[in-house]
Amino acid sequence: MPHRSVNKRIFQAQADVRKILDALEDATQILQAQRDVRQIIQTDEYIRQILQARVYDVAVETTLDPARLLTKRLKNNVLLKREDEQPVFSFKVRGAYNKLVQLTDEEKKIGVITASAGNHAQGVALSAHKLGIEATIVMPKTTPDVKVNNVRALGGTAVLVGDAFDEARIYALQQAEEKGLIYIPPYDDPDVIAGQGTIGVEILRQHTGDIDAIFVPVGGGGLIAGVAVYIKYLRPEIKIIGVEPQDSNCLQAALAADERVILDQVGIFADGVAVAQIGEYTFDLARQHVDEVITVSTDEICAAIKDIFDDTRSVCEPAGALGVAGLKKYIEREQCENQTLIAIDSGANVNFDRLRHVAERAEIGEKREAIIAVRIPERPGSFKQFCAALGRRNITEFNYRFSDKDDAVVFAGIQLKSGGDGRAELLESLRQQGYEVRDLSDDETAKLHVRYMVGGHAPAGLGNEIIYRFEFPERPGALMQFLTTLGGRWNISMFHYRNHGAAYGRVLVGMQADTSEREEIERFLEEIGYNYWDESANPAYQLFLG
């Protein structure tokens, strides 16, 4: 039984405290000993809270399923902790309910408020409804209708404020202070952390054999803090590995700096973990108990979504697939075999229309497709000759428009064999056959925009064109507002917008401006506050659109 094991650990912890106190020799050792004692006491308290957490009034004990296809392909025993099976399709209901159930009767009468863009919101709404508590959920205006409607269906009052989570959070905190409502944090709270820690309890109960590593998605850190403190307490030999998107790596950055940092920009593809700063409580626990953090790309996340679907026939959200994406990257790096590796599938709240973007990128993430630009002679038979140069590789995409009487530049997708470094082999093979080729597989501008615009070369005489890539909040009228704000000052020479079913629109814009105006443009872009990147030197733009 877990409680018996915990009692043994507590006795051992008390003995450790006595040994620390007996070994004191100087002031430095005293300070270190005091920190060690505080950590032992803190850990014991979290273990108590996790074991006493009341989550199963609304949450269910989710399954720990074997991923048979991944196991066979990766030559390791891969298990999935299926938090997508929760009533709100996310682990967040555990921490939300454990926090609400701890409130006093007087606090429950007052009512609660929180800010969330989705999973925490639904967890609070369901938990409050179960406990008969009035709940106000402040959500960004960009929140997809499916999540807003579900919060209302679960009994919560949804209030839409601002374009991003931070604006919603500030408003919720203001309302909590003005109206005396109880604010329910999404991750940075001991009761919330303890609720999420029950996942660790279930994992050790469901798999009593050897476990080499557990891969945990990281946003604000509530999930990894709760799981890590419990697992490391009972089974310190098990590695706890956090997984973050490359463009939302707040825990990795904090561990590197040995203090909490605020990211300048946060990627929004995996919106469930799009957090600029790790929590205070969660960081304190993570740096004690987490072994490392692995970051993964958007394409690797998309490939992991497909992997989970192939094994379970369920569609997880991007944040939910982080664990599998990190697990695959770990195996590739370590070249390990026959280990038992567990990935937490943290949720399945995904908009249906996002799946087209996932499907487009999954093959690249799995290294089964390469996106390339190739220069071929502009003469009859060149395309056939190029196909022959590819050997038995299939062409998945081919974009071309006449622009020069001597040479043609084509945008092509090429299918690769599974396993090995097929992309490098393809590039080397084409170069040896005399082709000038450029790899665009990791170029976001090429994959998001240029592939849909091939054939639109700038006309002769168009000068002073500057290219920017933007992310802006997606809401009714947002595109028109963006165009009006931008186009009122500089001539727009190129524009490409494509909705991927996310909370943010992605735009590629060309503007005509003199070199002397560039500083003014940069100041203007800073003022409007959208994420942007200067893509004027981007090779895909220069080859196909410039």
Image (cartoon, rainbow, N blue to C red):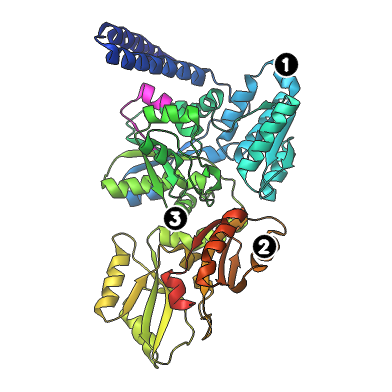
Q: Which mark is residue 266?
A: none
Label 1 vs 2, first from the N-terminus: 1
Residue drawn at x 28%, y 14% is: 29
Q: Is residue 96 left or right of residue 267?
A: right
Q: Quadrant of the N terminus?
A: top left
The picture places residue 85, in percent across and down from the top left corner, at 56, 39
Q: Which residue is mark 3?
A: 303
509 is within the stretch colored magenta: no
The picture places residue 496, in percent across and down from the top left corner, at 58, 69
Q: Which residue is mark 1?
A: 106
Q: Amino acid at mark 2?
A: Thr
Label 3 vs 1, first from the N-terminus: 1
Q: Amino acid at mark 3?
A: Ala
Asked whether the residues under the numbered discs 1 and 2 touch, taking CB atoms below 8 Å apart as contact, a structural biologist would say: no
Q: Pick the residue in front: 32 or 321.
A: 32
Q: Is residue 193 above or below residue 485?
A: above
Neighbor class of circle 1 (other Cα within 10 Å; few <14, some 14-19, many 20+) is: few
Label 2 vs 3, first from the N-terminus: 3
Q: Which mark is residue 485?
A: 2
Secondary element type, mark 1 = helix
Residue segment shown in magenta: 229-241
The picture places residue 156, in percent across and down from the top left corner, at 73, 35
Residue that extends furthest to the front in the rendered view of this protein: 516
Secondary element type, mark 3 = helix
